[in-house]
Image: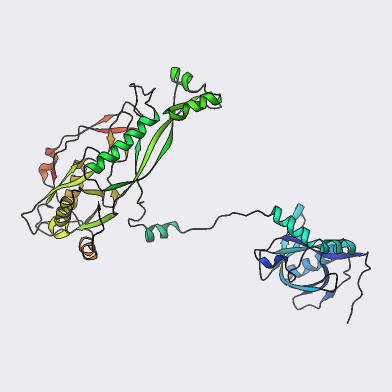
Amino acid sequence: MDHPQSSERGPVVAIECVAGSSKAEEWGGDMLQTGDVVEEIKIGGSPAVHSPFKGGRSGVQKLLHSAFKRGDTSIDVRIRRCGGEAAELQACIVPQSPAGRRQYVLRSIRDPNYAVGFVDRMVSECVALQGSRSSRVVCALSTAKVQDGYVPYNWEKKMKEFLPVPNSSCFLSMLVLPKALDLVASRYNCLEDTLARANTWLFASQASGVPIEFMNVQTEALLTKISGETASATVNSGSLSDLSNLANVSLYGFEDYHGVDIGVVRAVRLWFTPAAGELAVDIKLQEGDTKLGFAISCTEEGFIYISSVDDTDDEAASTRSGLRDMFRQARNADKLLVISRVSNEKVLPWMVSSAGAIRCFDTISISQKLSLHRHALKSIRIHVLMWEQPPAYEFTEYKAATPISLPLPPSTADAFETGFERDTAGDVSFRFNEISQSNGWV
């Protein structure tokens, strides 16, 4: 049965797009578009309502409100376009509350991102909108923006699943502070000097046999409070010519809105990586083990390494774990067998203070930790830096299923003398003072 239409110039209920689709069909003929004239509305199992709609848009909103209140949110909408073209939308009724007044829009079942509403328009306006589709597509293209948002991410699961050592990164770096020129650290050497010191540390480490490779270098800004001559010399740099002079300085400043002079110290962070990754070694202990059978030392650059192994005891823990064989292979390759982690905790050097001291772990505390594990018969795992990828059979041998613990002779603590001294160049910078370089047998 044909239903009477409004006059060509009369008011009709038309479609207004309120949210774009995520699919390419949005501008195709099958999707409802702004300016389409509503012919029929069918809500759930209720009889279809045809145009003209009593009350126009307000009447349609009342129909939607009643349906939503009774929980009937399924709706089919049929539209017509000039030339007799028709299209249909299957959607859900959802509330929208602009300006505090509840209104309803329709979200497509096929694409929930696509939503339309109803408006009162003249037929001539609808015809004009339908005829301007091409220009509206161009306009939409010019105003379209790529949207961003947040998606949940299971960090705990991923960190356990993908990291070789759970909750610990494989990134290795050394932070080199600029060298202070006075005891109060008010003046520093230039940035180029700091870069040269970072470069020297890397080359010296490689020359000593530490199997690491360069990855990247960057400057890192550290905030500090400055005053007096330092403030007047660094804060009053306002012109472009002054800014160009800051390119190679290690300290510059600014004044915050409280009038406090803030200094920015430009440190250098050197990123490096093991030449062939890290290898986990589980050292298993047995009742009656009195030693682990290897000694540890510290390089001048702060790396802890296995300096010797017991070649005479085939039953030592170091032999059973494969450390003796690895030590021999490292020696044949002119490399050091560097320990990177103890019980999954990194034990690599990580900072050079403004006084020039390298902040690193000392062999005494590591030896004591290994000794405690041995006495408690608790397994322990160490990681070593590799200089080449080991064959598969060797990897299986070294990486046992369970971690193990390590022993330390009681006299080890007496073999070392160490002290901590406050670094005068910074409030939070400490350094080891005169750490003994002698071997620490465990």
Residue depicted at x 42% and y 37%: 219
Q: Quadrant of the N terminus?
A: bottom right
x, y (%) of residue 336? Answer: 20, 47
290 vs 400: above or below: above
| Residue at the limit of the structure toward the left, as seen here | 312
Foreground: 69 or 168?
168
x, y (%) of residue 422? Answer: 29, 29
Q: Is residue 76 visible?
A: no
Occupied quadrant, residue 63 = bottom right
Q: Is residue 357 visible?
A: yes
Residue depicted at x 9% and y 57%: 288
Occupied quadrant, residue 98 = bottom right
227 vs 131: above or below: above
Foreground: 316 or 285?
316
Q: How is the image coloured?
A: rainbow
x, y (%) of residue 431? Answer: 27, 33
* 239 horizontally vs 420: left or right: right
| Residue at the limit of the structure toward the top, as seen here | 229
x, y (%) of residue 64? Answer: 78, 67
* 22 horizontally vs 136: left or right: left
Residue depicted at x 46% and y 30%: 247
* 229 horizontally vs 92: left or right: left
* 223 horizontally vs 392: left or right: right
